[in-house]
Amino acid sequence: MDIPAKNVSAIVSEIKNLLESNFSNVAIVGEITNLSLSSSGHWYFTLSDKDACLSAALFKMDALRNPLIRKIKDGDKVVVIGDINVYPKRGTFQVIVKKITPLGVGDLKEQFEKLKRKLAAEGLFDLDKKKPIPLMPKRVAVITAQRSAALADFINIYKRRSIWMDLVIVPTLVQGDEAPRALRQSLHNVIKYSMEAPADKKIDLIVLARGGGSLEDLWAFNDEGLAWDLHNCPIPTISAVGHEVDYSISDFVCDLRAETPSAAAEVITHHQTMIKDKMHSLRGRLKSTMEIKASRLHNRLKHAHPHSILNIIWGQFNSFQKRLRRCDLRNRLHELTHIHEFYVELDTNLEEMKRLMKEKMMQLQHRLDRSDRLLKVLNPSNVLERGYGYVESNDGHVVASVASFDQLPSGAELNLHLHDGKRKVSKK
């Protein structure tokens, strides 16, 4: 019988209507994990118990009506009231929380803390019992999920930083009910392989690796049996489970905890990277030293060339020739007798004498010009030109007043001087 086919949108729409109509205003008890606050003010988390988990969201406006959300943390047990919502784009459903009430510590968190206290009391976490991590392991066994992102990150860093280290990938389950048994079996297989392998094939280090996740996702690494196996493992171990904020029992039992699988790869290859950097540095220094040495030898060889030697000889010959010319007293007469200094002094005195004579002549010329101007001003002829005249007696005395004129006898001859000549006149 043919079954009518429906497209994805139709099926998801029917599921959405069915769930949202039948699961409205439901109350759910669960443990909080993966709690996060978005930049827009919405809270996202996972409600879980030992058998199942459910995504949940508390949007900003509802979060303002539930201020206790800021005091809730991963591992707390809560009761939420809300509606089941289906998101068609992803084909997933979640509970849209309207109210949230704390109930205490969740079951998984409580189990984790209880087992942690028990194993700590039994000495599984003691630092003095931890084995040192080899600085440069030759063979490392990585127990992780096959084709996982954690393994890809680990291998990427290993290829970039390692020199001679070999990786033995041990694929296993890292999540689910069968994961603890699978992890223990993989650990036993690595230990058995290393004990039976020849000396150059033995395992120097074991790494447990897994990417991040919720508390229930990482629960396989909280197995008590796995903790005892790691404690009794004769090979040093590193726990690289989850992200920086994730902790599991294996982190406390293993000889070293790495924050992430990538961090574990960096720790293992750290000293190899240091050796590579040292080798690169020494290579550069050796190359520089060889270049300097070769340059010096090249210069020595160049200086040993016949042309270079001949140039040196010619240079010395020219130097000696100049020194010999300096020893010729005939050409150095002026220099040795200092007569050139007298020549210089004589020229200096001559120039100074010329300068002083020139200044004296200028001074005399100035005095002469000034006297000439003064004589021109005092010259009587210059006064007569302005319409003046004067009377002179025959004996050459100037008649300068009326009294002098009256004393002259009647009929006395006088000389009248004008600017362009003189005439004879007589007194009546």
Image (spheres, rainbow, N blue to C red):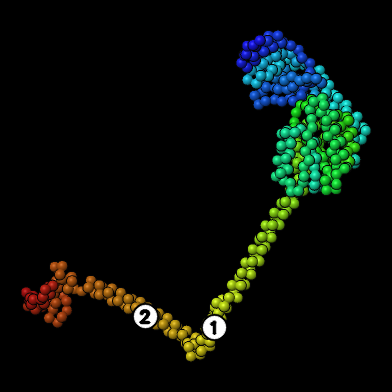
Q: Residue at x 64, y 64 (%)?
A: 292
Q: Position of residue 44 (x, y in %)?
A: 70, 22
Amino acid at dot 2? Lys
On screen, 108 above or below 340?
A: above
Q: Position of residue 41 (x, y in %)?
A: 67, 23
Q: Nearer the viewer, mark 1 or mark 2?
A: 1
| Front position in the image: 22 or 61 | 22
Judge left or right: residue 96 versus residue 118: left
Judge left or right: residue 14 versus residue 184: left
- Can you see residue 131? no
Name, please, the residue furthest toward the bottom: 330
Quick one: SS at disc 2? Answer: helix
Q: Which residue does the numbered mark 1 point to in the structure image? A: 317
Q: Which residue does the numbered mark 2 point to in the structure image? A: 354
Amino acid at dot 1? Phe
| Front position in the image: 61 or 123 | 123
Name which of mark 1 and mark 2 comes first in the sequence.
1
- Can you see residue 392? yes
Q: Residue at x 77, y 46 (%)?
A: 165
Quarter holding residue 122: top right
Quarter holding residue 181: top right
